[in-house]
Image (spheres, rainbow, N blue to C red):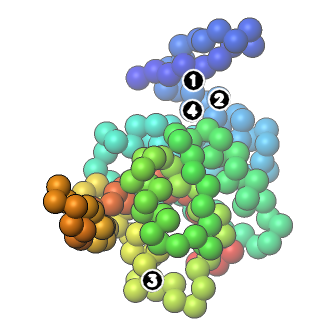
Amino acid sequence: PSGLARKDDGSVDRKSTSELTSLISITLQKNYLFKDMKWPQLASYWVMGTWLYDNFTELVYLRMVGDAGAGKSALLNLLGAMCYRSIKMSGADSESTFFRVVDDFRGTILFEEADLPDNSDASNPIVKFVNLGAMRGNFIYRNEEFVGGDAIKGWRPTPFETYCPKIFAMRGD
């Protein structure tokens, strides 16, 4: 497998997977201070996976945990700039926003401030969205209004996609 990288003159240069992951890892190391150098390499493979996720049936999520001011948002933005169709969302967004955005754009969710209020156990709708989205074929169904050929309104169960790469920046577990 290979990919494309831009040269300084704007032309495109074909790179191998190994070269691309090395470039991503080097970019991460230049812009963020890691305690352990295995993390930039691991994150580079994860970023590459966002471009290929449709080839898999299950996904691994990436999560950054730290106190306020630790640089989680900076790292989230840096990684997100290299991910496939990054879409920045937050714990303030609603469950329906999450699954509708995923269904419409099929990109990588950058989940900023992923610490959810009080009800962050398995009964929380956003937690359900996250749990369902790790495996292909798990949908969230909602009744959607439609107008039939006879101009009569009705309701139709509609599946919404949950499967996509997700990266989380949060303070707690």
Q: What amino acid type is highlighted by mark number 1?
A: Glu
The residue nearer to you, when weighing 30 against 96, is 96
Q: Quadrant of the N terminus?
A: top left
Residue at x-position 80% and y-position 72%:
68
What mark, if any, has residue 19 been given in the picture?
1
Q: Choose the circle earlier in sequence order: 2 or 3.
A: 2
Q: Is residue 50 above or below residue 36?
A: above
Q: Residues within 10 Å of mark 1 (few under 14, many from 20)?
A: some
Q: Nearer the viewer, mark 1 or mark 3?
A: 3
Q: Residues within 10 Å of mark 2 (few under 14, many from 20)?
A: some
Q: Secondary structure at mark 1?
A: helix
Q: What amino acid type is highlighted by mark number 4?
A: Thr
Residue at x-position 39% and y-position 75%:
128
CA distance separating discs 4 and 1: 6 Å
What mark, if any, has residue 21 been given in the picture?
4
What mark, if any, has residue 124 been given in the picture?
3
CA distance separating discs 2 and 4: 5 Å
Q: Choose the circle earlier in sequence order: 4 or 3.
A: 4
What mark, if any, has residue 171 been given in the picture?
none
Q: Secondary structure at mark 4?
A: helix
Q: What amino acid type is highlighted by mark number 3?
A: Asn
**Rendering coords of residue 65 (x, y %):** 66, 68
Q: Secondary structure at mark 2?
A: helix
Proximity of marks 1 and 2: CB atoms separated by less than 8 Å: yes
Residue placed furthest toward the right:
69
Residue bearing mark 2:
23
Can residue 76 be seen? Answer: yes
Residue placed furthest toward the bottom:
118
Name the image quarter holding residue 102: bottom left
Can residue 134 be seen? Answer: no
CA distance separating discs 4 and 3: 36 Å
